[in-house]
Image (cartoon, helix red, strand yellow):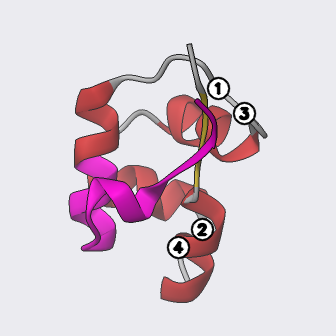
């Protein structure tokens, strides 16, 4: 199983948004957004949340997710 990281902080910074604003705009629960933004690596993620976040940032899922290890 691989490791991934979500580039939430970087994308939010580019937009000038806080993590709370990302949560409000995406409909993803704040604690989930915060958790994903803080983790340096994850093995599992909620695909629905990733899809919502990618749409919110107007990027592809490939641009939101960084593959650290396959």
Question: Between tags 2 and 1, which lies in front?
Answer: 1
Bin the neighbour count of mark 2 within 10 Å (Cα to Cα): few under 14, some 14-19, many 20 and up: few
Is residue 4 visible to us here?
A: yes
Q: Identify residue for label 1.
A: 42
Residue 18 disc label:
2
Secondary element at image label 4: helix
The quadrant where residue 43 appears = top right
Q: Earlier in the sequence, mark 2 or mark 3?
A: 2
In the rendered image, the vertical position of residue 59 relative to residue 34, given as above or below:
below
Q: Position of residue 59 (x, y in %)?
A: 29, 70
Bin the neighbour count of mark 4 within 10 Å (Cα to Cα): few under 14, some 14-19, many 20 and up: some
Horizontal side, residue 11 vs residue 38: left or right: left
Residue at coordinates 32% horizontally, 35% vertically from top-left? 49
Q: Alpha carbon of mark 2 to alpha carbon of mark 1: how far? A: 22 Å
Horizontal side, residue 53 vs residue 8: left or right: left
Residue 11 disc label:
4
Tags 1 and 3 touching, CB below 8 Å: yes
Question: Between tags 4 and 1, which lies in front?
Answer: 1
Q: Alpha carbon of mark 4 to alpha carbon of mark 1: how far? A: 18 Å
Residue 41 disc label:
3
Image quadrant occupied by the C terminus: top right
Q: Alpha carbon of mark 2 to alpha carbon of mark 3: how far? A: 21 Å
Secondary element at image label 3: loop
């Amino acid at each position: 199983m691989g490791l991934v990281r979500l580039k939430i902080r970087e994308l939010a910074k580019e937009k000038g948004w806080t993590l709370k604003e990302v949560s409000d705009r995406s409909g993803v629960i704040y604690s989930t957004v915060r958790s994903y933004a803080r983790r340096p690596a994850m093995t599992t993620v909620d695909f629905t949340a990733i899809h919502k976040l990618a749409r919110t940032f107007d990027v592809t899922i490939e641009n939101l997710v960084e593959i650290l290890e396959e």
